[in-house]
Image (cartoon, rainbow, N blue to C red):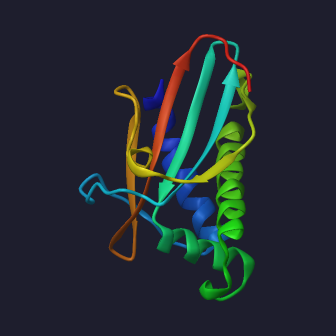
Amino acid sequence: MTAQFQPVVMDVISEVLEKMFYAMVDFDDNLADKMYDFGSEIRMFNPRGWVGISLQVSEEFARMITANLLGVNEDQVGEDDLLDALRELANMIGGNCQAYVSDEGWSLGLPRAWRTGGEEGRRASADATELRFGCLGEAAGRAVLEYVNGSATN
């Protein structure tokens, strides 16, 4: 199931980051795997199960896109601003993905964001799809897509 969402999610992430956060990213499986500082997630639900779209990003990237969104200097961005911007990013990505697959009865959950701790910045289930992305030639983050079959709640 995540395979059908992969091209949609890649297009949506690129478009949202470019248009709303003024950041250009490139997806590249050859980017180094690393620990990331912040995470955000949104889930899409339907009667058959749910798809989780989580983002894990470096603090530098999170600070840059937050400053771009708010129209301030990066040194003016606090941690609450980072978390709010990452929730908004997840919400925009989820909403745009939902629009692509709206004929399948999907509903959108609430976005969440957090500062990662230890392995949480790298953990993904064995059947999850990982999409690494970079900005200006450096690893900036990754998106992790996970499908869980069966009914679920928000």
Nearer to the camera, 78 or 140: 78
Question: Where's residue 151, x and y in %?
Answer: 66, 12
Report the side of 130 relative to 151 (left or right): left
Question: Where's residue 97, x and y in %?
Answer: 64, 41
Residue at the image point whose x is 43% and y is 31% from the top: 3
Question: Where's residue 129, x and y in %?
Answer: 39, 36
Report the side of 65 relative to 135 (left or right): right
Question: Where's residue 21, x and y in %?
Answer: 63, 71
- Numbered marks: total: 0
Residue at the image point whose x is 34% and y is 27% from the top: 126
Report the side of 37 relative to 75 (left or right): left
Residue at the image point whose x is 75% and y is 40% from the top: 110
Nearer to the camera, 27 or 125: 125
Nearer to the camera, 95 or 114: 114
Q: Quadrant of the C terminus?
A: top right
- Vertical comparison of 19 with 123: above or below: below
